[in-house]
Amino acid sequence: MRQLTRLLLVLFLVVISLNGFAAKGKSAQDAANDPRLKGAFRRPADHGWIFVHLTGSPSEIGYQHGFLLAPEIEDLLKVETVALTHDNNKDWQFFRDAAQKMMWPHIEGEYRDELQGIADGANAAGIKLDVWDVVALNGATEWSYYVKEYDKLHAMKSPATTAAGEHCSAFVATGSYTKDGKIVIAHNNWSSYLDGARWVIMFDVAPASGQHFIMDGLPAFIHSADDFGINSAGIVITETTIGGFSGYDPEGVPEFVRARKAMQYSKSIDDFARIMKEGNNGGYANDWLVADIHTNEIASLELGLKNVTLERKKDGYFVSSNFPINEKLVREETDFDVHDASRSPNARHIRWEQLMAENKGKIDLAAAERFESDHYDTYDKKIEPDERTLCGHVDLSPRGYQPWQPPYGTAGAVQNKATTAAMAAKMQLVASAGHACGIDFKAAPHLEKHPEFDWEKDVLRDMDSFPWTLFQPAK
């Protein structure tokens, strides 16, 4: 069966090569011999994930990425064109123009080359797009922040759907809280199911400069975007967004550039904090959880635009669920009510604190996997998958997740990752696509029951749940 799958993959790549290169007067053999593809490969889907190994210079890594993931990039471009234009009441050209005029001047050469390489590789495989499409895709997680500032500047009222999604549930623990006294870290990605069902690329990147790293991500993205990754210096990174945040500096460095650079070049927690703070534009404002497996130290970098707080520990934990921590940040940069226990971030924060207390001294990989599938609603005080549980199911909630999602919105936890210090030393992690709890999402029945989401029908797909699977760099 595995041999058949590999054969089908080879045939698939030959077909896209023939389609793309025939248009340019080149042969499939030319494609196979292109020196930019040397050392790169794509493995067949494994429990819902696509594993891609990229290596070389920035332009080579980009070209490999664009060529090997061309069908997925074309698909995601359709998804984001539908989602971003609907949510922000702006056409796709608006985001392309902003990518070129606002973002591009603040992107350093290394990542310009990689972004251009992605466009070139996808073009070679027969997909029509350009570098501005690729940059606009990479900025997907921060466009809502920019649009709010843009509309304010131009005396326009942003639609209610222009709300930064409050994404993800995560924790990191060490010392007396873990079973072996070493670091354990886990994260699940909350997103719209539109892009969440596509958030299944496992990137293994060996760049010519910086650290080798492994991270989850989306096709065409040079950063993880949700974010979870491990680099060869022993730095493990994740985050969740800051709830109710607004603010954006168009003269700053795009968040996706800083996040990628931090993943690639950090050798310490200090490195990570410095890179993320330099040129901070406020886009995709997060509480970053970082671990250094060599010092057994963990940190929380709450990175607002005006207010930045770095806290570190060698014994204890940090939990993150879109619940803002710094009181000054809450007051000056958010509209967040920290006292409303019915809100998803607050309810999940309470649940994290409960789980940390109940499992002190016992947290290991199995516990992390269990936490990410947790369905206890602390507000209703019962087990019920909804928008207030760590394994989020907005689609099952009559309340939705306002203002991000209306009742029964197609969103929630879309995939999960976890690792330990011992695993991270080998750059290993486990990941599960879909809901970790095992509940599948089926698009057609949901749209039939909730026709208000018919605008999604052309790009909404089923999102099945898969078992936890081990990933590590290619040998």
Image (tube, grey):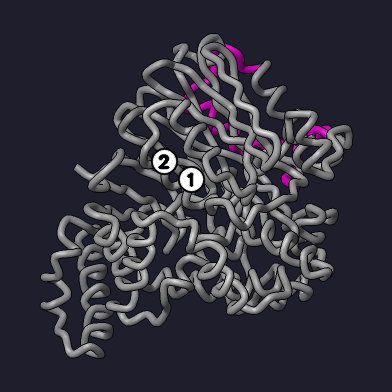
Residue 110's quadrant in the figure? bottom left
Q: Residue at x 25, y 80 (%)?
A: 15
What amino acid is found at the position of numbered circle 1 in the picture?
Ala
Q: Residues within 10 Å of mark 2 (few under 14, many from 20)?
A: many
Q: Is residue 307 visible?
A: yes
The image shows residue 169 at horizontal and vertical percentages of 63, 39
Question: Is residue 48 visible in the rendered structure shown here?
Answer: no
Residue identifier under label 1: 259
The answer to whether 474 is drawn above or below residue 82 in the figure is above
Q: Nearer the viewer, residue 231 or 157?
A: 157
Magenta-drawn stretch contains 376? yes
The vertical placement of 274 against 356, above or below, is below
As rendered, which of 341 and 235 lies closer to the eye? 235
Image point (27%, 53%), residue name: 53
Q: Are marks 1 and 2 in contact (CB under 8 Å)?
A: yes
User: Rounded to the nearest whole Å, what is the CA distance between mark 1 and mark 2?
Assistant: 6 Å
The x and y percentages for residue 465 are 53, 52
Tell me the amino acid under the disc marked 2.
Met
Q: Is residue 367 magenta?
A: yes
Residue wearing tag 2: 263
Q: Residue at horizontal 60%, vertical 77%?
A: 92
Considering the numbered disc 1 on the image, is that residue within a helix, a strand or a loop?
Answer: helix
Taking the image as shown, residue 423 lies to the left or right of residue 278, namely left
Q: Nearer the viewer, residue 76 or 43?
A: 76
Residue located at (15% from left, 70% from top):
34
Taking the image as shown, residue 109 lies to the left or right of residue 237, namely left
* In the image, farthest residue toward the top: 176
Quarter of the picture containing the N terminus is bottom left
Q: Which residues are magenta?
A: 358-387
